[in-house]
Image (cartoon, helix red, strand yellow):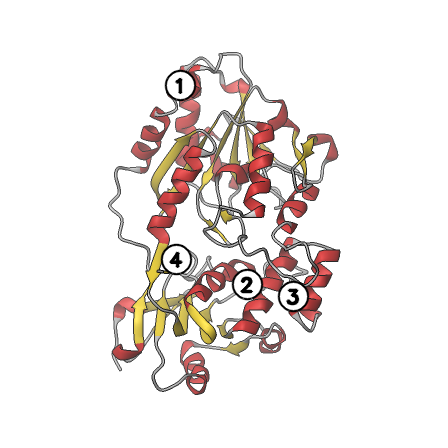
Amino acid sequence: MYHNPMLDLKCGDHSYNVQLAPERLLSVLRPRPLQRQGTPFELVERALDGCGASLASFAPGDRVVIVTSDVTRPTGSDVYLPLLVSRLNSIGIKDRNIEIVIALGIHRKQTPAEHKKIVGELYGRIKVTDHDCDDPGELVYLGDTLRGVPVEVNRRVADADRVILTGAVTFHYFAGFGGGRKSILPGVSSRKSCMASHFSLLNPEEGSGRHPKAVTGSLEGNPVHEAMLEACGMVGPDFILNTVLGPDKQIIAAFAGDWQTAHLAGCRFYNDTFSAPIAEKGDLVVVSCGGFPKDINLIQAHKSMEYASRALKPGGVMILLAECRDGYGNATFFNWFGYESCAELESALRKHYEINGQTAWSVKEKAKRFRIILVSKLPAEEVRTMGMIPAGALDEALELAAPMLSQQYRAYLIPEGGTVLPVMQT
């Protein structure tokens, strides 16, 4: 056994040090080392320099809407929004003709303090409006996608002379990647549109589960991504500004320009930086979400569970460190586990689709394929109901895992599970 202080795994505010025999450890999976190419301000300014042709077509009297993410998705908006507005001012567009719309999707409205955090020094100077997915008077129907997703978007966005999308590129567990087109659908779309687009991740046939292309890091042939692309094309943004953040939530790259090509460039960069190539799958994966607030609830922690499962053999053991001090993250999430089987849950989901129900199905499906030991503050009986094994601490979890593993087991350790995607090398 050995003790390595560099292998601390966080759970809430607590840190556990993992002790594994060296011959048991396949690898510690982390993002690739990155040499920053400038300060956050420099990176954004450099990206915006490439949008000169687009900005040159703007006129001083244009009404400009800038779409940006809510406070649950850090993007560096307090850095880039002032720089973007400064560019607009420099070509004669007044503050009064600029509005920032917060792409809430189906999330709650933001508080004044959260608005201030999002827009930084622009607070009180530029108008800020929260999108409301349930207000029919503030929505405009633009048509249906080829697969029948109705596209209803925010009226302020639809009526603007110019639309600029901003946000961050990340992995997304069924849309492939966040950022880009996602600012429109689900960002500023109706609840009906959001649900329909997310529902497209399921195969059409009852009981057939998730579409094989609707997975993390995959865009080609991904039906959810394609629905988002079509919806964004109906709006026709003038350009986008997307960032990539490091583990410290600081901007490490920025991409601006055409809403499709700039986003794809950001996706390629993100994939190269945050994918961890592996040559084989492990018998055991010990994964931390990265501590509070990344493991604040189970819905947030699911991202780490999803990514880490890519490094695990069928029937393997996953130890997930996720404190979940705020429980599940949604009042109805746990109710979905009243269904005995994945098939029953999926059938219910097809009859009454909810995004949180989809996450519940994804948790249950992985709990069937693997043996998942959850180190959390959730009630033990509820953890068992979800198909997982409860543990109060890492040592207890390792003891529970021991009889499930062979003498020759091999393991991966993942300290920041929500930012690293294991990828098998072919």
Determine crowd level at label 2: few under 14, some 14-19, many 20+ residues with C-alpha closer than 10 A. many
Q: Is residue 393 above or below residue 61?
A: below
Q: Upstream in the sequence, badge 1 or badge 3?
A: 1
Q: Upstream in the sequence, badge 3 or badge 4?
A: 3
Q: Tag 1's secondary structure? A: helix
User: Dot 1 corresponds to which residue?
Assistant: 53
Determine crowd level at label 1: few under 14, some 14-19, many 20+ residues with C-alpha closer than 10 A. few
Quarter containing the N terminus: bottom left
- The x and y percentages for residue 282 are 38, 72
User: Dot 3 corresponds to which residue?
Assistant: 334
Residue type of the residue flagged with mark 3: Phe
User: Are discs 1 and 3 less than 8 Å apart at CB?
Assistant: no
User: Which numbered mark, 2 or 4, is in the foreground of this view?
Assistant: 4
Q: Upstream in the sequence, badge 2 or badge 4?
A: 2
Give the camera-side residue of 35 and 104: 35
Residue type of the residue flagged with mark 2: Leu
- The x and y percentages for residue 7 are 30, 68
- The x and y percentages for residue 191 are 68, 43
Residue type of the residue flagged with mark 1: Ala
Would you say residue 335 is visible in this rendering? no
Give the CA distance from mark 1 to mark 3.
50 Å
Give the numbered dot on residue 298.
2
